[in-house]
Amino acid sequence: MSTRAVVGLSPSLRRAAFARKFAVASVVRNQVALRSAIGKRGVQTQSLPPSASEGILNEQRLKRPSSPHFTIYQPQLTWLGSIAHRVAGGGLSALLYGFSLAYLIAPGTFDSAHVIEFVAGLPDYVKTSAKVVLAAPFAFHTWNGVRHLAWDMGKCYDEADFYRCDLVMSVKGAYNAGYAVLGATALSTVYLVWL
């Protein structure tokens, strides 16, 4: 079996290397041929009133996936904490406004004496369960709010404070603060329930 060493360019590379001077004429010729072959597109447009264009836009929005797309993202403590903070705040607000409106509508039924009498008649496990249901969102919303207020103070924008603030403002710091909020929530909930 004999082997031959081929030195130099292959025929296709050689043609491409020496054909550069003919490339400009070739490109112009191809563009003219392409324009004559394609011709004009048959696109029709029509004027729409603003209400119709809004309807088309709403149809397009319904076909888009939700963002973040829950089927591809792994749940993270940062966005779960944000969602829980909003749900806890909304639930506590709904309870406060609901009780306030009920008191305004029927002040004789929802006054302090009637509420105390009603709660005193409940079994102990119902009282304890109600305390947990009220104390847990209150404690979480409070501690998570303190965490966000600490972030929003703006103390970590100076270069001199960078290394101190990196412990709080980094991803690791955000997770540590999230776990601290969960721990403080658990301890506060137990304290408030057994108060």
Image (cartoon, rainbow, N blue to C red):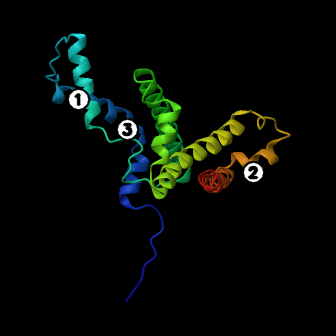
Please, what is the three-letter code of the amino acid marked with disc 2? Answer: Leu
Please, what is the three-letter code of the amino acid marked with disc 3? Answer: Ala
In the rendered image, which residue does mark 3 sit on?
Answer: 23
Find residue 64 and report its image quarter: top left
Tell me the mark number nearer the camera, choosing from 3 and 2.
2
Q: Earlier in the sequence, mark 1 or mark 3?
A: 3
Residue 46 shown left or right of residue 137 in the figure = left
Who's the residue at 65% across and 56% down the image? Answer: 187
Tell me the mark number nearer the camera, choosing from 1 and 3.
1
Q: Nearer the viewer, residue 98 or 112?
A: 112
Q: Earlier in the sequence, mark 3 or mark 2?
A: 3
Q: Secondary structure at mark 2?
A: helix
Q: Earlier in the sequence, mark 2 or mark 1?
A: 1
Who's the residue at 18% across and 29% down the image? Answer: 38
Tell me the mark number nearer the camera, choosing from 2 and 1.
2
Q: Secondary structure at mark 1?
A: helix
Find residue 165 and report its image quarter: top right
Q: Position of residue 185 (x, y in %)?
A: 62, 52
Residue 89 shown left or right of residue 142 in the figure = left
Q: Secondary structure at mark 3?
A: helix
Where 50 falls versus 96 (above or below)?
above
Q: Position of residue 123 (x, y in %)?
A: 45, 55
Q: Nearer the viewer, residue 180 or 19?
A: 180
**Crowdedness of circle 3 by 10 Å Cα count: few (<14), some, many (20+)?**
few
In the rendered image, which residue does mark 2 sit on?
Answer: 167
Label 2 – label 1 distance at C-alpha: 46 Å
Who's the residue at 49% across and 57% down the image? Answer: 124
Number of marks: 3
Q: Position of residue 145 (x, y in %)?
A: 63, 39
In the rendered image, which residue does mark 1 sit on?
Answer: 59
